[in-house]
Amino acid sequence: MSPWDGTVLVADAGFAFHGWSMATAAVVSAACALVGSFLVVRRMSLLGDAIAHAVLPGIAVAVLAGGRLGGPLVLAGAVAAALVTVWLTRAIHESVGLAEDAGAGVVFTTLFALGVVLVTLFASQIDLDPQCVLFGILELAAFDLVPLGPLLVPRALVTAVAVLGLVAAALLATWRLQVFTAFDQAAARAAGVPVAAVTTLLLGTTAVATVAAFEAVGAVLVVAMLVVPAATAELLVHRMPLVAALAVALSVVAACLGWAAAWWLNTSAAGMMAVVLGGFYALAVLLAPGDGLVARGTAGLGLAWRVAREDWLARIWRAGEEAGGTGEVARPRPRSAIERAAAAWLERSGVVESRRGMVRLSAAGVREAETVVRSHRLWEAWLGRHAELPLDHLHPPAEWVEHHLGAAMRERIEAEMAAGEADPHGREIPREAGGLP
């Protein structure tokens, strides 16, 4: 064999190692993210955390009985431990009155500790390393191969694909019931949906996905796979099918990026995947449309700018009203930096005309100012009639509401008033259209 051939074989072996490892991580993460979408939407993330830890004694007992990680006996033991966790949590809540989250904390820590004790006591009889239980052994998954047709495929990948198919089939078969229960449990129960059975199925699939992830990411970091992709997706989209699809996509991308970064930095693959997921969540918190910090900050700044702009126009209009409708008044003093900027912008854009310290509103400025003043005085009139507030308490709430009162609401308030009625201070309420003379 030539040196070139040997180099090609080494390269192919490296490619297979990385490819199989990333594929295993991606499939495991996808199964967890699919289940986690419902856990997050139903606000059951802590129970998912509890199951991820509490299945350990079930796994340990199943392995002691001759089961193998990823085998049917271990899956059955894990599901049994998960159901025991749920039953104990609810029993403690109903019998002792302990809050459900506190009960889940008591149960899962106790069962997880019991699992650690079993693994330690029977270390010679159980093929489970406590360190691997906690943090996974994804790096070794590509060396435990089983024949699948002409290929040698990692055993963990075969198990993960089977589990993903099982989880997806179970959730798709009960999709409508799962979504109905997730968003309105009381209505689902009233409509005859077997809520307990639907919840049990969800928790059972959570246990199965958790066991499949044990070998890859361990009991601690599987919680990140269950919760973080779904929590990130929920910030970005607001329909359940999109949440589930985006959560799966994010988990797959994080698995591949996390593996590549871990190999480059020579660190834990599972840990790096969780770090990448955390980075995705941080980006979503910043950039999510509508709910992200940037969007909320931009919306807040836009509102502050609109309020400053409308306040400046209304101040000029009121000054003209006090001057007897002359139109041109002395330029008011801005009360804040943003109002100063708004005043300068309005003058540059021609909405306000300025000359030698005097200002007046253009036709467009008059219309906008009258709308603001009209909203203010209509709201004061409504409060004066229905809230029975003293006159000196009417202005502050009206000053804020004037920027948010739409045309439909103005019409409704005006319909309650007598023709030509003034505000509680006796001032005329401007018409919907018109201007200063």
Image: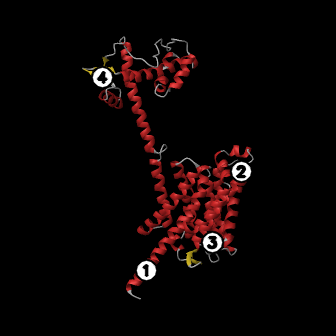
- Colour mapping used in the image: secondary structure
Camera-near label (3 vs 4) is: 4
Camera-near label (4 vs 2) is: 4
The residue carrying pointer 4 sits among few (fewer than 14), some (14 to 19) or many (20 or more) residues within 10 Å by Cα, namely some
Q: Which residue shows up at 58% across the image and 19% down it?
A: 386
Q: Which residue, given by chain and number where applicable, does mark 3 sit on?
A: 69
Between 371 and 144, the one nearer to me in the picture: 371
Q: Which residue, given by chain and number where applicable, does mark 2 sit on?
A: 195
Marks 3/4: CA distance? Answer: 79 Å
337 lies above or below 61? above
Q: What is the three-letter code of the residue carrying label 2?
A: Val
Q: What is the three-letter code of the residue carrying label 4?
A: Glu
Element assignment for label 2:
helix
Q: Which residue, given by chain and number where applicable, does mark 1 sit on?
A: 10
Residue 280 image offset from top left, x and y in percent: 47, 55
Quarter of the image for residue 435 reads top left
Q: Quadrant of the N terminus?
A: bottom left
